[in-house]
Image (cartoon, rainbow, N blue to C red):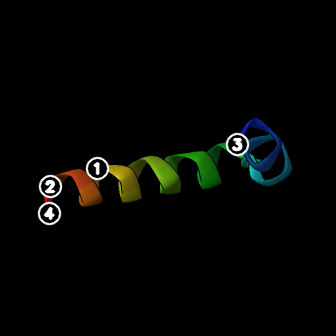
Amino acid sequence: MSLWVDKHRPTSLSKLDYHVDQAEHLKNM
């Protein structure tokens, strides 16, 4: 799993923020 994270980790802060928003959305479902 760590290899997948290393391969697909965000390359910019905006992408990271986007993924955080998606995670929050999924938690709220």
Q: In the depicted view, which residue is nearer to us: 29 or 4? A: 4
Q: Nearer the viewer, mark 3 or mark 4?
A: 3
In the rendered structure, which amino acid carries the disc numbered 1?
Glu
Residues under labels 3 and 4: Cα distance? Answer: 24 Å
Q: Are marks 4 and 2 in contact (CB under 8 Å)?
A: yes
Residues under labels 1 and 3: Cα distance? Answer: 21 Å
Residue linked to disc 3? 1
In the rendered structure, which amino acid carries the disc numbered 3?
Met
Residue count near mark 2 (Cα–Cα under 10 Å), binned few <14, some 14–19, many ≥20: few
Residue linked to disc 4? 29
In the rendered structure, which amino acid carries the disc numbered 2?
Asn
Residue linked to disc 1? 24
Relative placement, left or right, of 5 versus 22 is right
Q: Nearer the viewer, mark 4 or mark 1?
A: 4
Residue count near mark 4 (Cα–Cα under 10 Å), binned few <14, some 14–19, many ≥20: few
Q: Residue 15, relative to residue 2: is it above or below? A: below
Q: Nearer the viewer, mark 3 or mark 2?
A: 3
Q: Are marks 2 and 1 in contact (CB under 8 Å)?
A: yes
* The C terminus lies in quadrant: bottom left
Residues under labels 4 and 2: Cα distance? Answer: 4 Å
At x 70%, y 42%, the residue is 1
